[in-house]
Image: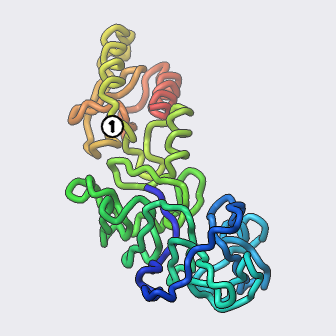
Amino acid sequence: MENNDEARTVAERASTSKEEPLWPTNTEDNYGCEHYKRRSKFVTPCCNKVYTCRFCHDQEETHTVNRKEVTELICVLCDTRQPVQATCQNCHCRFGKYTCLECNLFDDEDKNQYHCDGCRICRVGGRDRFFHCAKCNMCLPVQLQNGHTCVENVSHDNCPVCLEDIHTSRIPCHIPNCGHLLHRTCFEELLHSGHYACPTCQVSLLDMTDLWRFLDMEVSSTPMPEEYRDYKVDILCKDCHEESTVKFHVVGLKCLNCGSYNTCRVKGSPSPGKWYLLSFIHVFYTFIF
């Protein structure tokens, strides 16, 4: 799900009379920036400089700009400085085929943009494909409307991997079963690095059934030495949050409730003999899983 900026469309704000300005057809398409195609630049209220969009500003400056505080635009066709509006007061070109005067957003590319009053920003992807969850305080795919885990104001936290903003990010986010959000690119990097647990709550990010089945075979084919065969530990499962008392094994500690190996030891008896080495190996296995 990709996040953009807030909006009211041209159709809601512009006149539909015959005098409505038409989009110019005699200009080149090399306008805008890498983030947006638009025929305007804005004057930043924070440093009184001219940038094409807020992302261009934030990449160059040591501070960020509040898009909603922008009050002046400059037309890129006639260079007229003017108040924020949908069309140029001098040459009458539209600054963007999609225009939001609530978010000061202008974009000439069709991304199925829509304005969400709940999020107070514009989204992309089409209004009919998303719904706003009041508790999560964000738009979610309609497929999750009756089957997602609500986490209050979840999108207003930063990505736990890169620590960058999620709510207004243009990078799509991944929504695991636990409900905590992270950027999709960060999610893919986690998997590529061998980390399969949510950085926030440690619940498995994927269906790990095949891996748990493989570890079952490893446990059955790797008997523990006699002195450790009946040694038991108490564990907490990070997936189902249930506690179990299980036999210790160097491969991993399996939850008796859900069968997950995504577990950690919570307490246990004093360690016999070579326990320190076995404990270290178990910590390594639980870390990678």
Task: Note whether 2 is above or below 272 in the view shown.
Answer: below
Please report the residue visible at 41 percent of the width from the left and 83 percent of the height from the top. Answer: 12
Q: Locate the N terminus by quadrant.
A: bottom left
Can residue 20 be seen? yes
Please provide percent x and percent y for residue 259: 26, 30
Can residue 226 be seen? no
Q: How many marks?
A: 1
Q: Image quadrant of residue 36?
A: bottom right
39 vs 197, left or right, is right
86 vs 88, left or right, is left
Task: Note whether 277 is above or below 131 in the view shown.
Answer: above
Please report the residue visible at 78 percent of the width from the left and 70 percent of the height from the top. Answer: 61
Question: Callout 1: helix, strand or loop?
Answer: strand
Please provide percent x and percent y for residue 252: 39, 25
134 vs 44, left or right, is left
User: Which residue is the site of mark 1?
Assistant: 235
Residue type pointed to by label 1: Ile
Near-viewer residue (148 or 280)? 148
Please report the residue visible at 41 percent of the width from the left and 59 percent of the height from the top. Answer: 125
Please provide percent x and percent y for residue 30: 72, 61
Q: Locate the C terminus by quadrant.
A: top left
Q: Image quadrant of residue 153?
A: bottom left
Please provide percent x and percent y for residue 8: 45, 80
Please report the residue visible at 51 percent of the width from the left and 51 percent of the height from the top. Answer: 183
Task: Note whether 215 is above or below 189 in the view shown.
Answer: above
